[in-house]
Amino acid sequence: MMKYDWPGNVRQLRNVVERALVIGNKKTLLASDLPPEIAQPVHNFAMPNEASLLTLKTAEDDLILKALKSTGGHREEAARMLGISVRTLYRKLRRFTNEPF
């Protein structure tokens, strides 16, 4: 868990631990109880060239879409995964006027 970057900060950490304890139904938290991206994080520390840098908005949109895809479109779970409220997720989704959400 210490090797993971925790982009969602404390909220994400709390959600992951709570979920792992509920799913694992044990008093001891094991690596196998954690989501794979946290149990075995992949780090890419190569510095990107300027042409490959995304705007913050583009990166955020991409992350939101990936969270929705990984949760099968379940917005509450995606918001939890992103460490934001459902209300914030809905507000951000308004930017996707052409997407069928």
Image (cartoon, helix red, strand yellow):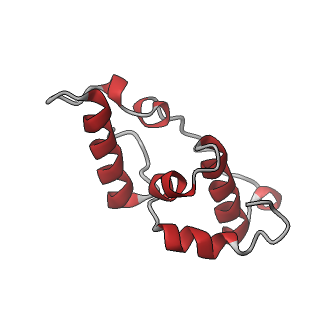
Instruction: Give the image quarter of residue 70.
Output: top right
Percent of width and height locating residue 6: 42, 51
Camera-nearest residue between 7 and 51: 7
**Residue positioned 68% across, 54% down in the render:** 65
- Taking the image as shown, residue 7 lies to the left or right of residue 14, namely right
Q: Is residue 77 above or below residue 39?
A: below
Give whichever of 32, 9 is nearer the camera: 32
Image quadrant containing the C terminus: bottom right
> Residue 51 placed where, x, y %?
83, 60
Residue at horizontal 64 percent and vertical 72 percent from the top: 92
Task: Compare residues 44 and 7 and report the one nearer the observer.
Answer: 7
Q: Residue at x 67, y 45 (%)?
A: 69
Above or below, 43 against 82 in this view is: above
Look at the image and tell me in which quarter the N terminus lies. Answer: top left
The image shows a total of numbered marks equal to 0
- Image quadrant of residue 32? top left
Residue 88, position as x, y percentages in the image: 53, 73
Task: Find the residue positioned furthest to the top.
Answer: 32
Q: Where is residue 33, by image quadrant?
A: top left
